[in-house]
Image: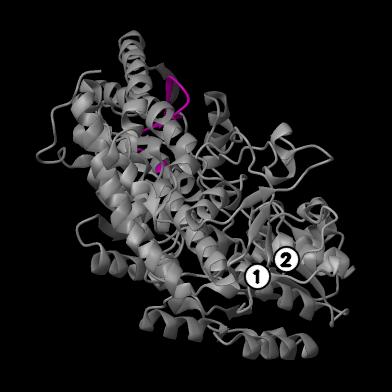
Amino acid sequence: MGTAAPTLVFVESGSDIDRMRHVGDGRDRSLRIIALSPEAEYALEKAGLPFALADDYYTGEEITQAGIANYDRVDEFCAYVDAWFEQRSEIVKRFGLKPARFNVYPLKILFDAVSVRLIILRRILTQEKPVEVWAAPEEQGDHPLDPFLFFGASIFARLLPSVCASLGIPFRTWKIDGHCADAVPTALHDLVNPGRSRNRYTAAFHTCWPLIQDLGRGVSLSWRRRFSASRPELLVMDLNDREIRLVSASLMERGTCRLLYWSRRSRWVASLNPFRLMRLDDQGQRDGILRTLTQETATLWPELTGDPGFRRFLVWDGVDAFPVVESRLQHVFTELLVKAAELNLQARAMFDKMNIRVLLMSQVALYWQRAVCAAAKDCGLRVVNMQHGLVGERLCPIVYYTECEGVDDLLTYGTGMQDFCRRHYPHAAVPLPTGSPALDQLERSVGNRNPGQVLRRLGLAQGKKTVIYCPTSSTGNKLYVSFSYPKSDSQYFAIQRRIVETFRDYPALQFVVKQHVGMPRGFPLGDLMRDLRMDNCRVVVEEPSFVDLLAAADLVILDSPTMTFLETLAMGMPVLVFNNWFRWEPETLELLKQSAVYSNDFDEFIGILRGYLATERFEGASRDGSAFLRRFGTYKGDRRSADRAAEAIEKLAQTDALAGAGTVAQA
């Protein structure tokens, strides 16, 4: 890195390798190739081309500091933008809409993704001091399923011209298929995610009924019971969530509250007990308000972009990143603002006309969830959230941006999460430990395991021992930097690659690698396994689920022990855990060591793994994980988590409306 390279070439996609041959143009020049992704890294390695990793130019501490700084930057950005809109829009002020604050979590991801890549590019360019830089051309336009978070488009490609210009370095893009890159703006379709939406929420109300039927799985429900018309009402919005479904089933069985279900894309509300549909009225009046707001946002957006106070938040280290994020932010402060207003007004009308006391949600992270919660708070309702994952296990302020903010009561899985919330976020929510209904259900199913069915589905043999490896998801462009920078995608790939290559040495065993559904497109772990020709190994992306795969497991390997770790403990599986990037709280780390074979040294972990694979004595990895499971999962271990959650919600529903709640605004 000490010697300047005459020409620097950035490669992010495997398909860039053939295209970059145009860089030569028949001239004799020295090239230095920088791999910006695991996909590029693996493709360059297979092509026999020398390259350097972007990781070689910066430290994790630099990235961590940038992420921490973005907490304050995003908070200040939200406060500034929301105040700006409130001063200029009577509708925003009247209904308490927060155009930026409703999107604070994805904004943090956006700011991290851009600022971190700016750091990486500046470190590379200032150390290499190239005479020119080449890269794939920026993809023109935004993918329709990627309006905000760069799930498919390349941030590096969008930033490189600006960074090079700030340093006075010539920047060029190579030719594609014999044409100038500018003439084929959509030529890099392979950099875009496939046209498949991963939105798990219902797209139309007619999908509600199968979900309602699923509520009763394992629970005896009576649909003919007579109820009092004076019962308090509970509004549920996330029937796709396992925890919410099981708690709703318990509430329906108890019969003390009337459950209402509302799909955010529907103008219908369903009473679940007894089942009937109710149409949201007053739509005409709301449509008039929304038309006015749509016209306002179209006028205000150009004014906002010309505001120096707004633009200053989008400059990092002298580089103006506004052109990179302009289309994303325009979407947020025009289209999403109108959608948030529509949901807020619908929710206000519903809360005003019905006897709803509690709003139950699975999370409070996205704009539509926050818009509905804001309406609930103004109307004096209690907002209850069912905690996800293992937030209580590590020092990570992500909870502030998702589960806690705007939530009165937080139903946590165990006392570990309750203590965590009380310690770090004492004013954000009231944590109520109930346990996880989904983990309870998983424990009940242990005796009904059918490994043969899972193995046949995967084309694996019965009678051979099966090892399940569930690697963590790489970040791609969806980067969230907390108080400890986890790993770069290249570092994740190096860990996963070495574990998978270890499997190759044990042909008598069979292996299943369960990738996260959120793994960025092009991540080369599957390519690696195909190249290694591991006939005894399968890669699973979506189905079967990790829980389904546990039925066939003799040993489980985890490198990011979150919810998957709790599920493994609930099934009583032997588990090996490697992790050296979480900042563990001391008491939690001790519980983890008691519950699993654990190491934070990767060489040591590989040695441990080889020892178990060689002997096939996986029972030696069994540990008593009940203490960890109770503290962060099942709470009391009595399989009554759903009932405890239902009881807590009933008590909230039967109390008076929130003291000091604002007057209900008429929509």
Residue position marked by numbered label 2 in the rendering = 41
Q: Give 174 or 98, whichever is nearer the viewer.
A: 174
| In the depicted structure, whether residue 355 falls above or below residue 530 | above
Q: CA distance from mark 2 to mark 1?
A: 8 Å
Q: Is residue 665 above or below residue 382?
A: above
The amino acid type of the residue labelled 1 equals Leu
- Residue at point 28%, 57% (across, down): 72
Instruction: Please name the residue shown 43% across and 42% down the image.
Output: 322
Q: Residues within 10 Å of mark 2 (few under 14, many from 20)?
A: many
Q: Is residue 18 left or right of residue 308?
A: right
For the point 25% across and 18% down, the residue is 667
Q: Position of residue 604 (x, y in %)?
A: 63, 91
> x%, y% of residue 178?
84, 40
Work out which quarter of the rendered image holds the N terminus and state it. bottom right
**What secondary structure is found at the residue carrying circle 1?**
strand
Q: Residues within 10 Å of mark 1 (few under 14, many from 20)?
A: some
Residue 410 in sight here:
no
Secondary structure beneath disc 2? Answer: helix
Q: Which residues are magenta?
A: 253-271
Query: In this orientation, which residue lies closer to the viewer: 29 or 393?
Result: 29
Report which quarter residue 234 is drawn in: top left
Quarter of the view holding residue 434? bottom left
Q: Position of residue 570 (x, y in %)?
A: 55, 69
Numbered mark located on residue 598 in the image: none
Residue ID for mark 1: 53
Residue that appears at 37% across and 42% down: 103
- Residue found at the very far front of the displayed protein: 27
Residue furthest top in the image = 284
Contact (Cβ within 8 Å) of mark 2 with mark 1: yes
Horizontal relation, residue 199 to residue 106: left or right: right
**Badge 2 amino acid:** Glu
